[in-house]
Amino acid sequence: MRDLIVDPLEDRGGVLHIGGVSALELADRYGTPLYIIDENRIRANYRRLEDAFRRRYANTRVHYAVKANTNLAVLSILRQEGAGADCSCPAEIDFARRAGFPSAEILYTGAYPSHEEIAFACDAGVMINLDSEARLGEVAARNPKPLMSFRVNPGPGKGKHGLVFAGPDAKFGLPADRVIEAFLRARALGFERFGIHMMTGSCVLDPAYFPEVTARLLEIAGAVAARVGIGFEFVDIGGGFGVPYEPGEQPLPVDRVAADVVAAFVDGCDRLSLGHPRLVLEPGRYLVADAGVLLTRVQGVKRGDKTFVGVDAGMNTLLRPALYGAYHPVLAADRLREPPADPVTVVGPVCENTDILARDRALPPVQEGDVLAVLNAGAYGFAMSSQYNNRPRAAEVLVLGGTHEIVREREGVADLVHRQRVPGRLLR
């Protein structure tokens, strides 16, 4: 357990503190389930990644993958740090603009976007990165000669829990043999500024993968530049930078990754006469995962063939364990120095037997009223939560150096029926 108590977590007298604030105080003050977000950790993660790349290639730009955590406070923190925004739908474009991102610093990449989504992105004046040629004519008609980028499927991808976004089974991006034709058509429609993009997988901890896939994208970019006669303002290698969740996993060596990626990038640009385009990264999980903790209160302990610890957070609150079988470390927030007992399975209140947050975990003996902390919950935690089983979604609190404030109010029952309408004939 001691190995899990790393920044922004602290053990103060056996009680978990997050960003200098007691987890018990937060649970009592705001209720549970409750997401805690540590501001300093987000800033530190961003600066570590950006510095590793910019020291080696000054023309690097980090675009935060908004879908990982859409809280406006999180977006505002990263905008203050100098990030751009990577958006996958119109709502995310709206969130980014509300958080103060200039339209010119927002890149929109939609998968199979509708006519309405393309219209929204064009009207918003953001950079558009198309997943196929299908909407190219619409973009050209709405925004004459803006920058145009295509998402490329460069071949085999890699990712944890099946989160692989490239290769023959991936729905994303233009196959390599159709990329040149797409750029030829874009040029014929009058586009004069270009980018090229890929996103091949999520939560990758193998440092050798990133320079390998970067080199693969550059080969495609070089072929396009030579055949179509264009240059690229940016080459976007996507994200996928992993964080350790499971025991034995090691943090991604970001300095090594940056050094190897930049070496592959510069070599490819020089060899293929691509000049010095902007190198764009799209991290999401790496920036926010370990800045988030989910607090949940024990509602009961049931002993039988297995011991089940029932809590008030379920698959509606944190979907990843039920959806992917994902592992999140779990701590008993007020029993950090107590020895573990027999393994327990932590389950939620949803009427599904897949509503499991953690299987066979060696926790100290816990009882009703205790607070558990589910770690690494800052990415795809609240963002994937739902109102399933008619349970309102959790609140979110931002902590900073011993202070705390609400940044998303807890939903209530009224939120579940807010947009429902009963026909008058049914009220009689």
Image: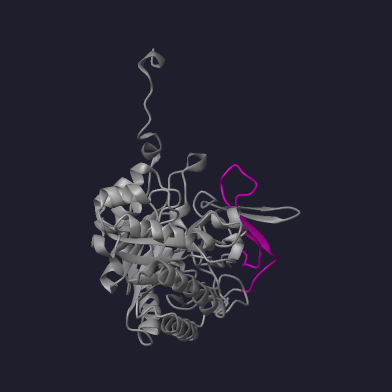
Give the residue drawn at x 47%, y 59%: 380
Kindly tell me whether residue 69 is visible in this rendering: no
What's the image's color scheme?
A: one colour
Q: Quadrant of residue 105?
A: bottom left
Most foreground residue, 394 or 362: 394
Please identify the residue farthest to the right as the structure is shown.
305
- How many numbered dots are placed on residues in this image? 0
Q: Is 69 rendered above or below residue 38? A: above
Where residue 150 appears, as percent x and y from the top left, is 41, 60
Quarter of the image for the N terminus: give it: bottom right
Quarter of the image for the C terminus: give it: top left
Seen in the image, is 131 located left or right of residue 72?
right
Most foreground residue, 348 or 177: 177
Give the residue drawn at x 25%, y 63%: 104
Q: Is 261 rendered above or below residue 132? A: below
What secondary structure characterizes most of the magenta part? loop
Magenta residues, as a range? 339-365
| Magenta-span inclusion, residue 314 | no
Kindly tell me whether residue 207 is visible in this rendering: yes
Give the residue drawn at x 39%, y 56%: 185
Seen in the image, is 84 located left or right of residue 367?
left
Where residue 95 appears, as percent x and y from the top left, is 30, 55
Most foreground residue, 62 or 245: 62
Where residue 175 appears, as percent x and y from the top left, is 53, 60
Give the residue drawn at x 51%, y 55%: 318
Seen in the image, is 198 located left or right of residue 403?
right
Where residue 414 appears, as percent x and y from the top left, is 36, 37
Q: Is 241 rendered above or below residue 171? A: below
